[in-house]
Amino acid sequence: MTARLTPTTLLWCLVTLTLALLPHAGRFSIGLLAVFALLVTWRWLGAISRVPLPTRDHLVLWIFKQVLALAAFLVIYIHYRGQIGRDAGLALLTALLGLKVLELESERDVYVLSFLAYFLVVTNFFYSQSVPTALYMLAVVVAITASLVRFNSALETFSHFACLRLAGTMVAQATPLMIAAFLLFPRLPGPLWGLPQDAFSGVTGLSDTMTIGEITRLGASDEIAFRAQFDGIPPRAADLYWRGPVLWDTDGRTWRAGASGHGPATPIIKLGPVYAYTVLLEPHGERWLLGLDAVTNVGDTARAHADLSLVARNPVKKRLRYRLESAPVYAARALSATERAAALTLPYARHPKALALARQWRVANPAPAALVARALDYYREQGFVYTLLPPALPRDSVDQFLFETHAGFCEHYAASFVVLMRAAGVPARVVTGYQGGEFNDVSDYLVIRQRDAHAWAEVYLPERGWVRVDPTAVVAPSRLSLGIDSLRTARTPLAILDRNSTAVAAWRQMTALWDAANFQWAQWVLGYSAQRQFALFTSLGFDAIDIASLMFALTGALAILVGALALVMFRAREVRDPLVLAYARFCGKLARVGLTRAPHEGPVAYAERVAATRADLSVEVTRISQLYTALRYAELPLNRALLERLIRKFKTTRRSGG
Amino acid sequence: MQAAASSADSSLPTSIALGLRRVYIVPTRYGYLLGGLLLIILLGAINYDNALAYLLCFLLGGLSLVAMLHTYRNLAGLKLASAAATPVFVGDQAPFRLHLESAVGRPRSNVSVLWVATPPRGVVRATATTLNLSTTDAQATLRIPTARRGRLPLKRVRVESVFPLGILRAWAYFETSASAVVYPAPRGRLTLPVSPADVAASALGSAPGTDDFAGLRPYRPGDRLAAIHWPALAKSATLLVKRFQGGGEGEVWLRWQDLGLVPEREARLSQLTRWVLDAEQRGLRYGLELPNASLPVARGAAHAAAALRLLALYDEP
């Protein structure tokens, strides 16, 4: 049963392995990739030409291979500083695979490498679980399976296409089983063991510190921060302030959340309609959550702080779904002594010009509301502009912004406004989060991207409590009504087109569709958790869902699906070829005159025997047999109807000369 | 021995379509390896709560179940249309020719046909041949070693396949009544028992040759001196001449009781076998006489086959 490794089988192995590794190309150093490519090429050349492989027969090459292996492991160890995390593990696996490819020779090697290729597919999922990744990997799985089919079809009689077709069929047949297992396999909450340290490296997003200039990067990112699906009609765009971390403390340059606002939450007063919605938050590795300002019901996933910011119990390391209720029009009157102190604190000896200006205003009119209006007027009158590419502020950032450059984006406005307010004696804080969102018509939800990140200010007015003030809105009102897109048109490729043209509309429709697909994917596939499984089966009317009953259901579902597939597969084949039936009729006619076809006799041998006994029939019998053989075995494009007609007319009664 | 025709009953076609319940299927060691890998992927999927890792694990698991159906289908409905073997001598391999048919007209890939001897110690995979029934029927020849004369029943033929993924092995047995006749090994140093009477009877038609010693005959004028059998002259004072043959017409009886000097039964049969072959080769007409059966004097391939068959099956139940 041992199959020989032919060059084509080898090529199948090498190609599928490379396909599985391809998406990793950007994820580790180019050197490792080069070594892998070298090893694969070397093995391939060894198969098709006289290039020697590093077997024990070529001692020098063999030693070279050992040295290469040692060097690879050393380099990986040093590069990743001995940390066995996700990246280092992948690098090690790649190096091992490359070395294993060189040894690829026996039947066992083919299986081991094919299975490792399957494993390599999984490693991709720890970097990306997007729809394109899934589709690409599905194709890779078909290719690996086809490679196994090719290896197992004796003498390689299967064409490349036939291998792919059979593998594709099998994968398609396995899909219902996969879906059943995915839905029914009992999900456990929480990991079995710790996650590697680098599991969430490179995740971008809002952070709970703000240094002027940092949100510029977010402004350019199309990555999705979260999605929100409202139970009814969503609030209007100007009310879509998604509250994130609230920043209290500053050293004059960087703002931090601090602990001042982390006291127990006090209830707020709803002054308008309440919206219920579900948030699907992309993982960002931190604990804070986002909610529409201001959240009135935090549900069971989130916890609210006194400053109305939300946090989760654990860092958000995977996509998180939670439900909230919010009232966009509200009053928050609570202000503790600690909070008041924190909301008035300014760093020592910073922003002297701003402080002087604020004191000047306070002398003119100490009423807090008047001070807020005065500050906003200042932005309006002094010709401030909104830009995503502000000039550098190397010295005192607030003073430079307020008195020299007059150009910046939301962070600059929010930070400088809070400094002015605190200097004037009005308690103020910076709130970060997102503003707006793009409505997806296809699936009725809002997509909030990283570029929607925003920062605004809140001031405490004695008669009204905490009041949101968004100084950015004063300089760039469209930033809020149209979203940040309106300010970025000059930089997008579609800018030359009219915003309302059909092309733009079509493009928008397409992106909406694509994102809707992604949303469903994220909701139903990636976000399918123990909680969701429970919810699904409860909604179907099952109340007591435990591991045993799920396993029982899973076994039953698999048995039914396999049985159904078997039924289809075996029934379909019972239909006999009309050609075979016609030939059987022909044999039957001859059998009636004593020329029965022996079970071991092929059509040709049979025809020869008949022709030898009945010379009168030889011409016809030979013709029918030749036609039958050609049609059936060579599958030549000949006339089937002709054969059937010949057989129908065939008579055994004729005698030569009679 | 190539000339010996296959005996009638060993070529009886046996046709048994493999029933659905008769195909056995178990994972190969690579199947277990894949199972281990799936377990690792599943643990990873659970730990990292990675939906796509779950999906891949379940897809490959589903693929294994689907492969079970495909592997099974590769054997199910296969028919052993006929099995027959030509006779051989002890020590040679009996070539059983098997004709396999795909009963439902469906091509098969990579089907191994094997014969498994079952001696007391485990299973011995004697011989295997791999087939591709791409044209819905195929021939295979199993060469089965022989150790003793008599009838060698094939009993069971095993067909197996790991197609398409190599992770599962399906197998099934054909029970067959086909058997091969195994002739005794031609052995023994005794020369053909050519009696004077036989010689006389055959003298007329024999075409003298110089190759093989074929017996003695009375001296006739003109015979070479070198051909005179001097020891016979010394014993009986008759002038006998050594007769050589390149294809003669002599007649000889090969008798069990003539072999009193050979006490052992199998050795006697071997000697008789030797004689049958020798007689046939020389073109002699010969008869065979065994304690329980006899064959009249005749010549030719069919006669030799009948004689050898008698010897092979002597005292067989």
Image (tube, helix red, strand yellow):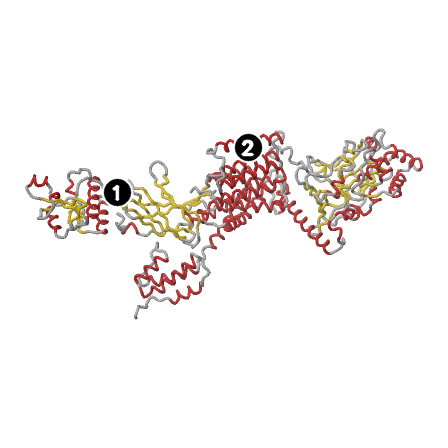
Kind of residue at disc 1: Arg
Identify the image quadrant of the N terminus of chain A.
top left
> Is residue A413 shown above or below B101?
above
Amino acid type of the residue that numbered disc 2 sits on in the rendered structure? Leu
Q: Nearer the viewer, residue A580 or A226?
A: A580
**Residue of label 2:** A68
Q: CA distance from mark 2 to mark 1?
A: 62 Å
- CB atoms of marks 2 and 1 within 8 Å: no
Residue that protrudes farthest toward the bottom in the picture:
A658
Q: Secondary structure at mark 2?
A: helix
- In the displayed structure, B132 sits above or below A27; it is below
Across and down, in percent, residue A508 comes to: 71, 52
Q: How many marks?
A: 2
- Residue A266 visible from this viewpoint: no
Residue B149 is marked as: 1
Q: Horizontal and vertical percent for residue B255?
A: 16, 44
Q: Chain of mark 2?
A: A
Callouts 2 and 1 in the same chain: no
Left or right: residue B226 compared with residue B89: left
